[in-house]
Image (cartoon, coloured by chain):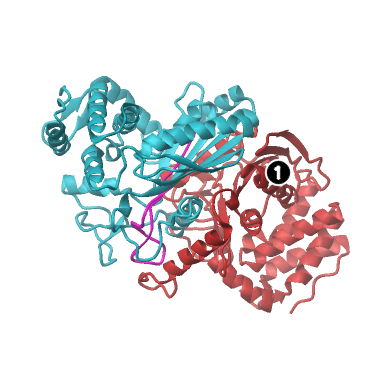
Chain colours: A red, B cyan
């Protein structure tokens, strides 16, 4: 890994904002985009952090991501709304839609938002947690073009669509799940490439559809739990791409022609107060977590962790000590900084 | 397996109706209960079929299932409703709530129903498919007391909460997923007991929390995909039991005192017409399935099957040739038949 370089979160956020402003995003949108990326780094989800900045810059150059989109409501009912994102930066449009469905949920009990033609949304947990912070249960699902074999096949037939669900607790951090439907997320394979280590045989296939332990040729992800991850991914497409009239898993489409940047997504907020007392709810979530901690541990496990807890632990450490970035990421950011004449953040 | 005994579906349904009427269910409720159980048998989901009849009869005897419940709406908003099921037979109350949320979805775009204190609901796909038949996307989730180890633990800390999602197609049957969050459903372990065969080591733990291949001592299920199935199960409890103010995963509760019969559940309907053209939607689901069929197959796979397709194939066969029941199930049904003076169905 070489020397570990750390950057203070606010420094990194400010830098990222300036880059995106240079790319053409309105200032308020650049702030949102930087916030969501650095938030992921702070929680240790580096695959969805600032390493994306140079990729996004290129996608704008190539016309695949739109810094000044015409975001429009296509249709709306008391509890639902569908937005055309016009290839907006994902966090810019997704935070907007989640705020909208939270307002709907206050009146209708639930708000169900559908996004058509957004681009990379970052870590989906950001949006489900927005609902949890508003004392609601939040859910977010996204589907992109195929990168995962479905059960019984050896070629890409589904996206490893992630789902995030979050709920508020009382003394504890919100309970938040954010999982891909593949055995391993693509970022874990990239990490194995960087580290020069093999991957488990059950993670992925090579381009010919054969199992492999070589991360350099592992291009087709495998579904978690076989038919389970595979089935969830197919039904998630039916709730996102097909529901938006913008199917992502059409045969032979692959990732051609910039479509790999396109995503369709749902964000959902369920108002807890529509069903039960919010104080009771928060207490019961704390009790749920407390109870799990007391269970007998499996061999080799020091502490039983609940969804979101590993990320919360990293958040504490990185808020205090800064965000570590590999030399490769630093180099890529320096290149973008030079191009736009933006000063690099101070290194700790 | 011995001699295979088959019963014509309508014969079996009529028999089951009469038993439940004798148990004290109003005729219209006995019809619903019989319909949902025999429907599961017709689709090959025998673990959720008529083998449950004697168990339900005993649960009524013991006061755990209520044949004449006072089903009440506890609260309601334009898009949500929460019912107290008063320990009703699951299908009786769940079909009622799903019909209600389908009506809500016609007005509000989405209907979100929460059921408190129901009992065994049978196969959850029945309810998500009700929505699909109404040209909606349907979802159903249920949580009961702990029967599955969470990731990192060796004791029951979650229920292997199933989720079902269904959507309508055009020429093809609806796409319908119905999966437990455990590696294997409990019914598969019971089947291994009946067949006298070992189970894979990754399915379950014995009562001491050790991995086992002996289905006779396999009492603690293991989560599908480790932290993924485990995380889904915990968040599903937050959407069901905790949302209903009736936590199922409280520490040390176990399955004591008849609580093992209690379930909390959500049923959700999303109106496709609120977002897109229903004809386009149906065509796109057909295309999704057609496209999957054309993908290169994994070794040993004759045909790529999508969610719900194996069950549809069994449905065709059993509608024509009758439902096969093992001798043990026949014996148990005969015992109940004698008690209530109901004539056994004709055997084919």
Q: Which of the pair A59/A121 is nearer the observer?
A: A121
Q: Residue A188: x, y in percent? A: 55, 60
Q: Can residue A69 be seen in this view?
A: yes
Residue B191 in the figure: left or right of residue A149: left
Chain under disc 1: A
Q: In this view, does B152 lie to the left or right of A93?
A: left
Q: What residue is at 43 percent from the left and 45 percent from the top?
A: A228
The residue to which callout 1 is attached is A118
Indicate yes or no whether the magenta region holds residue B149.
yes
Q: Does the magenta stretch include residue B330?
A: no
Q: Residue at x 65, y 62 (%)?
A: A40
User: Which residue is pictured at 33% across the width and 37% down the height?
Assistant: B68
Find the magenta span and give its range: B142-167
Q: Position of residue B70 (x, y in %)?
A: 39, 40
Residue B94, horizontal then vertical, whole percent: 42, 37
Of A69 and A144, nearer the camera is: A69
Q: Position of residue A244 (x, y in %)?
A: 65, 34
Is residue A278 shown above or below A90?
below
Q: Residues within 10 Å of mark 1 (few under 14, many from 20)?
A: many
* Quadrant (top left, top right, bottom left, bottom right) of the C terminus of chain B: top left
Q: Which of A256 and A142 is in front in this view?
A: A142
Going by the image, does B295 lie left or right of B301?
A: right
- Tell me, yes or no, if residue B304 can be seen here: no
Looking at the image, residue A327 lies above or below residue B148: below
């Amino acid at each position: 890994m070489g020397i570990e370089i750390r950057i203070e979160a606010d420094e990194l956020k400010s830098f990222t904002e300036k880059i995106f402003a240079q790319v053409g995003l309105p200032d308020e949108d650049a702030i949102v985009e930087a916030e969501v990326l650095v938030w992921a780094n702070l929680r240790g989800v580096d695959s969805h952090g600032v390493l994306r900045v140079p990729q996004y810059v290129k996608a704008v150059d190539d016309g695949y991501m739109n810094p000044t989109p015409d975001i429009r409501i296509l249709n709306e009912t008391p509890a639902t709304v569908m937005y055309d994102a016009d290839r907006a930066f994902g966090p810019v449009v997704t935070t907007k839609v989640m705020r909208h469905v939270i307002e709907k949920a206050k009146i209708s009990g639930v708000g169900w938002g559908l996004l058509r033609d957004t681009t990379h949304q970052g870590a989906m947990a950001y949006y489900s947690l927005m609902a949890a912070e508003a004392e609601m249960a939040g859910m977010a699902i996204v589907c992109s073009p195929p990168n995962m074999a479905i059960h019984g096949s050896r070629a890409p037939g589904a996206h490893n669509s992630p789902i995030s669900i979050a709920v508020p607790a009382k003394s504890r951090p919100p309970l938040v799940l954010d999982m891909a439907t593949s055995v391993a997320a693509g970022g874990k394979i990239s990490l194995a490439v960087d580290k020069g280590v093999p991957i488990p045989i059950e993670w992925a296939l090579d381009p010919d559809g054969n199992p492999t332990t070589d991360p350099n040729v592992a291009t087709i992800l495998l579904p978690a739990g076989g038919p389970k991850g595979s089935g969830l991914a197919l039904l998630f497409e039916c709730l996102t791409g097909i529901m938006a009239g913008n199917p992502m898993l059409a045969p032979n489409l692959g990732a051609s022609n910039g479509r790999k940047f396109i995503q369709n997504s749902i964000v959902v907020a369920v108002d807890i107060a529509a069903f039960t007392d919010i104080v009771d709810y928060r207490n019961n979530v704390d009790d749920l977590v407390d109870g799990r901690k007391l269970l007998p541990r499996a061999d080799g496990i020091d502490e039983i962790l609940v969804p979101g807890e590993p990320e919360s632990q990293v958040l504490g450490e990185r808020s205090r000590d800064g965000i570590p970035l590999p030399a490769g990421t630093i180099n890529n950011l320096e290149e973008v900084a030079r191009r736009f004449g933006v000063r690099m953040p101070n290194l700790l």
